[in-house]
Amino acid sequence: MLTDYHLHLRPDDVEATAAEHFTLANVERYRAVASERGISELGVSEHIYRFRQALDVWGHPFWREYAHDDLDDYCEFVREETDLRLGIEADFVPGAEDRLANLLERHDFDYVVGSIHFLSDRALDMEPYGIWDGTQSAEEIWQRYFQMLGEAARSGMFDILAHPDLVKVWGPARPDRPRPEGDLRRYYEPAIEAIAESQIAIEVSTAGLRKLARELYPAQAFLEMCLDAGAPIALSSDAHRPEDVGADYHQALELLQRVGYEELCVFEHRTRRLEPIAASGAGSTGMSEAGAADMESEASPR
Ligand SMILES: [Zn+2]
Ligand SMILES: [Zn+2]
């Protein structure tokens, strides 16, 4: 079986409305690409900050700008009109754990994808509110990032840890946003310790291939440490448009095979089970086409 659990039904532009994108016709477009690529299990995980209710959790100006939609309407649409698993991508905001937990508990999600896009109020992966202004070293940012990833894992609020080494997003094209020198496992360690304790599922995401990083999330060394820690895997593309559903899965499947993962997590009402990864080359058709087609801008999907 193949899954794609980290899907957004719309691009990240603030103008991309729910009314336009939360439609059966749009879901059909995602389904069509998924079936071409041999992916049967799909779930959506819209950004929590696009819903008004999220402002009870955090009042960052970026969230205030984006929080237009109603979370109950989204859940109702996905549950009642589609055959998609119902997920959500929720940012881990230290200090707001109780408020986020309350919000999540009020909805019947199949899974919650936990993300870190901000360290304090500074963004890792976009320009506005960006953290890479030279006031903190790359070493400091990497250390803080993986520490916080561990806290997110330990919080118990999330089923899947999204794009685990997102901090590398800018890649070598931005030497002003470098990755630290040498063996990066020293940064991963605090996160891996928390992953081992919590047994949270780790997302293997092809989104990094479409960013300046040009790499899968996470790096092979990180994934090897996850395997040693006994953590299972969730496979996703983080697509924000139909053509990216299952994008570049052949690369993700090669990585999983190299590291020694043979099963994927499947989620229902926040319980998970493991299924063998499809043995055939399923998921490889049409990949290069989608991968090569217009690379998204670095400020795009998150
Ligand atoms: Zn996402
Ligand atoms: Zn994200």
Image: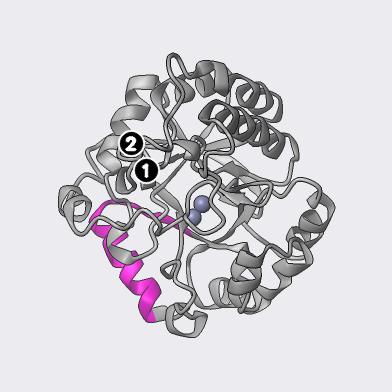
- Give the residue drawn at x 25%, y 39%: 250
Total labels drawn: 2
Instruction: Please give the range of residues in magenta.
Output: 25-43
Disc 1: CA contacts within 10 A as few (<14), some (14-19) or many (>=20): many
Q: Which mark is residue 208?
A: 1
The amino acid pointed to by label 2 is Glu
Residue nearer the viewer, 161 or 172: 172
The answer to whether 198 appears left or right of 45 in the picture is right
**Which residue lies at the image location 33% right of the left edge and 28% below the top edge?**
255
Q: What's the image's color scheme?
A: one colour
Image quarter for residue 232? top right
Q: Nearer the viewer, residue 296 or 2?
A: 296
In this rendering, the answer to whether 289 lies above or below 185 is below
> Residue at position x 41%, y 28% from top?
219
Indicate which disc, 1 or 2, sits on the residue closer to the N terminus.
Answer: 1
Magenta: main secondary structure: helix
Residue identifier under label 2 = 215
